[in-house]
Image (cartoon, helix red, strand yellow):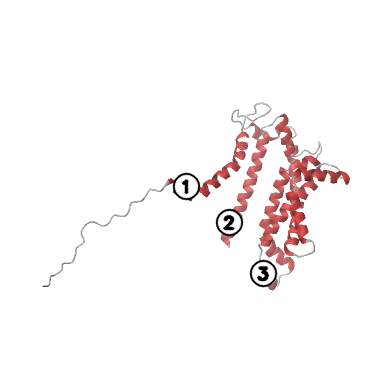
Amino acid sequence: MATATEPTRVTGTRPASPARRRRNPWTWLREHVVAIVAVLAFVYLLLPNVVVIIFSFNKPNGRFNYTWSHFSTDAWTNVCGAPGMCESLALSLRIGVLATIGATVLGTLMAFALGRHRFRGRPQTNLLIFMPMATPEVVMGSSLLTLFLNLKIPLGTTAILIAHVMFCVSFVVVTVKARIAGLDPRLEQAAADLYANEFQAFWRVTFPLVAPGIAAGALLAFSLSFDDYIITNFNATTSSVTFPMYVWGAAQRGTPVQINVIGTLMFLLALAAVVTGQLVSSRRAGRA
């Protein structure tokens, strides 16, 4: 006996979509732990700079201006109010610029020699390049002092400049050499195939590619020269007091607020240089 089967009719409502589950806070923390640690480290590094910026607007309240008095712009309107500070700052800037030029030129030439050529004594030369970076500054400062005294080189600005060029060269060589190692030699070969001579291939192909490394090495050399105290103190005289030496001496007898103003200006200039470099690099990458 055949029975007709009636098509089954689906009754009821459409299955509801699963409710959005609440995210576990620990899951969110585990996914963002690297970013959180990076932000905390960045804040930790910038916190002293923030304190310097804040205290540059502090009202002078005695010899040691380490406690907040009230907001004032007196230090900004009278930057050279502290005796001898602007003279020491000018000396540090002059030595820093000259040392940067000398170290950048010598370091770039040495980086090209070490990165492009094979010669006898190359491993030993690389070792000598790293020696100033690994040697404690106390040892280097005392050694340079002994060298200058034996060679009858008078201490002061000239001795400080020679010392700064000496230890800044190593950082320039390492920075530029790393940039050279990443270059493709076939680019210069292609330029030669297009009838460019050696100078044209270097100036139009190699130099623009190495220029960011040279600029980074120059900025690093200037910051190291401007900031150095130990080596400078060994080879300085009473008439060649740089800004770090002035700050150290001021910490013993009284700290003017203008020191915070100079620190703020140097920080803002360094920040502007870094941001400008990043913007230029991003624009070039976008055009490429």
Q: Secondary structure at mark 3?
A: helix
Q: Position of residue 2 (x, y in %)?
A: 12, 72
Q: Which residue: 53% across, 49% down?
A: 34
Q: Which residue: 66% across, 42% down?
A: 266
Q: Report the side of 10 relative to 246 (left or right).
A: left
Q: Which residue: 71% across, 55% down?
A: 174
Q: Nearer the viewer, residue 185 or 132?
A: 132
Closer to the camera: disc 1 or disc 2? Answer: 1
**Amino acid tagged 3:** Arg
- Residue 51, above or below 152: above
Which disc is residue 282 wearing?
A: 2
Label 3 Cα crowd, 10 Å radius (few <14 / some 14-19 / many 20+):
few
- Residue 185, above or below 26: below
Quarter the N terminus occupies? bottom left
Residue 208 shows up from this direction? no
**Amino acid tagged 1:** Leu
Query: Between marks 3 and 1, how big is the CA–CA gap?
Result: 47 Å
Q: Nearer the viewer, residue 277 or 78?
A: 277
Residue 139 shows up from this direction? yes
Q: Which residue is mark 3?
A: 186
Q: Which residue is mark 1?
A: 29
Residue 60, image quadrant: top right
Q: Secondary structure at mark 2?
A: helix
Q: Position of residue 132 (x, y in %)?
A: 75, 50
